[in-house]
Amino acid sequence: MNKTIVGITFRETMTGPFALGETDPEAGETAGKKAGTNLAMHAEIEIHDLDRFVADATHTGGISGRIDFKPLGENITAARGVFRLFSPTGQKGVTRMVYELAFEHQGQPYYLAGYKQVQNDRKGIDLWNDTTTLFARLHIGSDSNAPVIGAGVLRLGLTDLMKLTSTLRVINADHPADQVRALTTFGRFFMGSLWDTYGPKMRF
């Protein structure tokens, strides 16, 4: 009997100060605050085959969504991109959550590339900040190799985190047991990855 191939979907919104003319996310955050310009990434994550996703060394899934950024427009559709969860960086103890979306405005392609740096650094256990802070750059072109024309820092607030949790869905599950298995698999992967990074500094 073949095992059912199940997946996971969820939606995530991250918002923060963002400015054109900057290439460094933190400088873009500062400039965005002064100018009052924010960018919002509304991401829809879809992991079609959860077991393959967990086994894949880069933990790559699908992503699409929408972009809100007044200098370019509101509710701009982004049909494709790159999503990775706890993807290795080549540095010991450091992984990244990668969120990238390609979109067009007035016929011009743009590419928003961001990452969350997950690491147990000298500042202590900064799990919340690491997993909710996205350092983002806007490229004028079709991928992250194109020139950078803007930057900023987007964050996932507590309210947005609660919304994310409520959007978590299991797809292609034929039976309730498949749903339970998928949620358990994803939960173990997520929490296990966090423990691998932050566990050594925790004291009980």
Image (cartoon, rainbow, N blue to C red):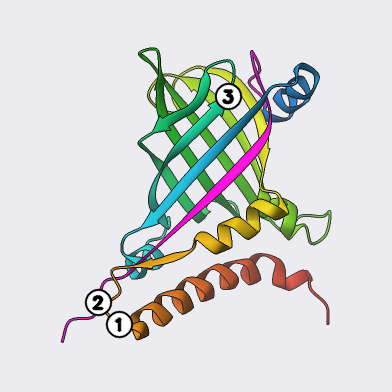
Q: Are marks 1 and 2 in contact (CB under 8 Å)?
A: yes
- Residue 3 highlighted magenta (yes or no): yes
Q: What amino acid does circle 1 point to? A: His
Pick the residue in front: 57 or 163.
163
Q: Nearer the viewer, mark 3 or mark 2?
A: 3
Q: Quadrant of residue 20?
A: top right
Q: Which residue is mark 1?
A: 175
> Pointer 3: what residue?
69
Q: Is residue 77 left or right of residue 15?
A: left
Please provide percent x and percent y for residue 113.
51, 33
Q: From the image, tell me which residue sits under label 2.
A: 4
Secondary structure under tag 2 reads: loop
Amino acid residing under circle 3: Phe
**Which quarter of the figure has residue 158?**
bottom right
Residue 157 rendering spot, x and y as whole percentages: 70, 49
Q: Which residues are magenta?
A: 1-24
- Between circles 1 and 2, the one closer to the viewer is 1
